[in-house]
Image (cartoon, grey):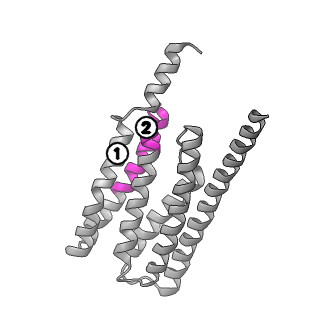
Amino acid sequence: MFRGEVMVKSNKRNAIFTIPNFLSLFRILLIPLIFVSYKVYGNLYFLGTVIVLSGLTDVLDGIIARKFNMISDLGKMLDPFADKLTQGALICCLIDKYPFMLTFICVFVVFEVLKAILGYIVSRRTGVMRSAKWFGKVTTVYLYVAFFIFLLFTEIDVVLFYVIAGIGMALIVITSCLYCGNYIIELRKIKKEKALNEK
């Protein structure tokens, strides 16, 4: 590989002002609108529009990043961060209506923090920021759809609510365990390689 090619790849990794990054930032800026439209004005139509817009920009930034080679370290961090903040905001909106969501957000926070800590350790030791996996994206899409249903359909059956919420919680746990399992495997590989190099 030529030096010029290495520099181009490095610049792309460290890029800040990219369309996917702006879309992720836009999703973060939409979060106050979620609270205002639901908690202050109770405008479900506007809330639904904000959720759909947030979900579409989430899908769009991933497509643009891959298709136009705009994947960057900042984007790898900003994209999931925007997802988790949006999901957390939606869960908080639902707590008054569905007390079970208090348990949901506790599980959500515990596993996300654990995943973030292990991901940070791996990134520090390898110097490489990991992208979101396919199973993480599946969970994100499911949660968007579930929260959309909970917030906009006010007369949802209790049993149906617990089924949808239970599946969402199970996906969070399974996805987090898969991520953490991958991180632990990587850390073991790093430890083994270090031990071999010291011999």
Percent from the top left, x then y, of residue 93?
A: 34, 74
Which residue is located at x 48 percent, y 20 percent? 7
From this view, report whether residue 167 is shown above or below residue 195: below
In the picture of the structure, the residue carrying the numbered disc 1 is 23
Which of discs 1 and 2 lies nearer the camera? The answer is 1
In the image, taking residue 13 as reference, residue 47 lies left or right, namely: left
From this view, report whether residue 180 is shown above or below residue 150: above
Which residue is located at x 59 percent, y 61 percent? 176
The N terminus sits in image quarter:
top right
Percent from the top left, x then y, of residue 175?
A: 60, 60
Query: Residue 85's image quarter?
Result: bottom left
Percent from the top left, x then y, of residue 19?
A: 35, 37
Q: Are marks 1 and 2 in contact (CB under 8 Å)?
A: yes
Amino acid type, label 1: Leu
Counting every numbered tag in the picture gives: 2
Name the one closer to the observer, 148 or 8.
8
Q: Disc 1 or 2, which lies upstream in sequence? A: 1
From this view, report whether residue 60 is shown above or below residue 71: below
Tell me, for residue 91, which label it has, or none. Answer: none
**Residue count near mark 1 (Cα–Cα under 10 Å), binned few <14, some 14–19, many ≥20:** many
Q: Secondary structure at mark 2?
A: helix
Instruction: Look at the image and tell me whether residue 144 can be seen.
Output: yes
Report if residue 67 lies within the magenta region: yes
The C terminus sits in image quarter:
top right
Q: Which residues are magenta?
A: 53-76
In the picture of the structure, the residue carrying the numbered disc 2 is 64
Amino acid type, label 2: Ile
Which residue is located at x 42 percent, y 54 percent? 81
Q: Main secondary structure of the magenta part?
A: helix
In the image, taking residue 144 as reference, residue 22 lies left or right, namely: left
In the image, taking residue 44 as reference, residue 191 lies left or right, namely: right
Give the alpha-carbon distance from disc 1 to disc 2, as whole Å.
10 Å
